[in-house]
Amino acid sequence: MSLFGAMDSSTSQILILLSLLFPNTLATTAPSNSCEKLMLKIEPQAITVNLRQSTEFGLFVSSNSKHNLTLTWDAEEAIVIRPPAITIERLQDANFTVEVSSSQQGRFIIRPIIFASDPELIDDNGRLFVQLKVAKYRALIIISMLIGWAYTVCWTIGDYFQAWTNYRRKSVVGLSIDFLYLNVVGNCCYATFNVLLFINHHIQSEYFRRHPFGLNPVVPNDVGYAVHAVFGNVFLIAQCYIFQNDGNVVSKLVKFLISGCVLLVGVFCGLAIGQQMHWLDFLYMLSYVKLSTNLIKYIPQVFMNYQRKSTEGFAISNRLLDLAGGLLSLLQMMLNSWNYDDWQSIVGSPVKFGLGFVSIFFDVIFMLQHYTSAPMNVLCWFVLGLGVGVQGTSWSLSIVPQSVVVTFGEPVSFNIEASGLASEPFELQLFWPRDDAIQIASNQSIRATVGWNNHSVPLLIEPVKQGRFIVKPSIEPAGIVDDSRLFLLIKVAMYKPLIIISLLVGWSYTACWSAGYYPQIWLNYRRKSVVGLSFDFLYINIVGHISYVVFNVFLYWNSYVEEEYYRRHPLGLNPVIGNDIGFAVHAVFGTGLTILQCRIYDNGGNSVSKPARAIICTYLVIIVVTMVSAVFDVMHWLDFLYILSYIKLSTTMIKYFPQAYMNYRRKSTEGFEIMNRLLDIAGGLLGILQMVINAWNFDDWRSIGGDPVKFGLGIFSILFDLVFMFQHYILYRKRNPKIIVEFPMLPKTN
């Protein structure tokens, strides 16, 4: 299916997507066929009971006219139902209580058999049944719930041990970033699998159709764990970009694997949207992605531990809790299957079953590395004396914090953190360069003793000149540590108030640009129409905004890309700051909401034109080609981001033409909210003002050239805003109709 075929998808496909998000909303909107219908309903439809104990459910009958019918039950021989038959004579509304018990454990479906003079008048909505779950022991139901929450707690707490270790060390050295990224992809798939299979009735009905005697394999603690796991992984990834990471980045192989997973999910999601496969099959595909990531995600961490001959930086408490959680998860599944005599439910949840076994396997490997290999390595250092002098040491040396923003003349303090194993004592000398712009009190000396060392040495620096400075010490003796990332990035401003003003200006233009979407959204809602608004403008706009989001996020947070940027602009500041992120993400939301309105409200037959489709397809081809080139190191990822920035700039240059042409052709700006343009021109002026303030305050005019998107965005936005204002207020201004005032005839006078 092409991109524009997806844009023009049928109403039924949209309803399916909405039903996945709001499973209980659309089901209640279907109108009744006739006021004469006899409505039958059973509540609750799912009940749980112990062997040889009874429980109750209600049968509700409602109609606007009187009917006669007899109702009996279709159930297994082990099921006892009282009353066995219900007769309704000349009743409009009635409620009946039905008692049910079972002498056999398992999952059963109880259906009513209805005898009526006119069966077509009966409306049961296809849901007139009871799902009876019979357990052997009630105590085991409670134990199963406690076990479920116990392993959820174990798996959840484990993330905090690793997060605390990173925070305490102010470093993520020893933690594999490949492991984290594979983990977050798998957990996102697992969260989607659990949430949709747990809450969506459309998917549940298909699951029960394929597994008529199986229980839903997902229980509430699975949902809680999966959603929180995504949060925990994202938090750990954020720490990798905040704390010292010793240059560790995602490997090319893992980038390729993640790209393949994303592509696979996108293809299967498109097939499900196009009704070429059921959404349950899509969820099963997500479960297999989770299972595959669980099979491979630990391998990078195992290899890193082996390569470093240490588990330092990798919290073993996380693995101990993970092992306990895996064992408890398997125990819960076995307990439920035995208590309900429902072993098919294990097959219905391949993710949970495989997750438990694979996690246990790798947790054992990590414990062997930590409790067996690590002590043996230490024994080799101390007892056997296998160290080969100072060159055999494994040292980590970092400066915390590595980057600061200060005002000129304001002293700032740092800490030099040194840790590692030493087979013999030695002394490190750090010699700082002499510079007129930076004053450093003295050189530092770090003494290492035999065994494990952990030192923190204070450093005081006073900048005396504005600008951006990289201060790098020389180390003697050489070769002890990797000093390629041992430097200070000091950004010195002339005036502190200008830093605050720059922040306020940044958030102001973010507010202007963000608020500009809502006048158009409100106008569309009030008119219940998007006539006068160009679809070409919206679709080209959202492509540019998505490109701008990726550009801002990666250049702001990705240290690998930021290092390359600083290599090309050694005296430049990072051109992306916090409010750029906020604007870009919100812009995608605002434009997406407006596009949704175009699908809901009257559009006068407007659609995306063929030239706009060709332009969007060209953008997508460029993005895919350049991204593949970056994956295979044909070009740097920074160059890929620059390509995205140029796409955003080009969309800003062309996206307004369709709207300007539509206004010209209609000789009116009716339907196009001018307040959007007024806020946009204010935001453009403020954006350029912020860049000028920063460049002057930090004496860094080259930083403007480092962000072609923001600078070009401001200039072109202002230009086109003036065009729209000219159309609205001069060319196609609404003229008030002439009001004819009729005066009463004056009385005639002689």
Image (spheres, rainbow, N blue to C red):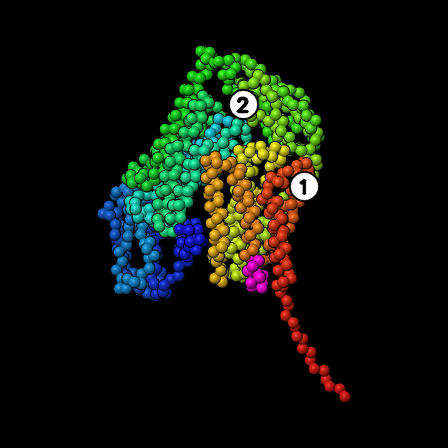
Q: Determine the residue located farthest toward the right in the rendered image.
A: 750
The residue carrying mark 1 is 693
Q: Determine the residue located farthest toward the top in the rendered image.
A: 384
Which residue range is magenta in the image?
A: 659-670
Q: Does the magenta stretch include residue 408?
A: no
What kind of element bears circle 2? Answer: loop
Amino acid residing under circle 2: Asp
Residue 487 location (% of width, % of height): 60, 27
Left/right of residue 333 with respect to residue 694 in the rendered view: left
Question: How far, Cα to Cα, is label 2 from label 1?
Answer: 37 Å
Residue at horizontal 56 percent and vertical 64 percent from the top: 666
The residue carrying mark 2 is 482
Please say whether residue 156 is visible from this viewpoint: no
In this view, the residue in front, 493 or 696, is 696
**Is 611 located above or below residue 691 in the figure?**
below
Q: How crowded is mark 1: few (under 14 residues within 10 Å), some or many (20 or more)?
A: some
Q: Quadrant of residue 306?
A: top left
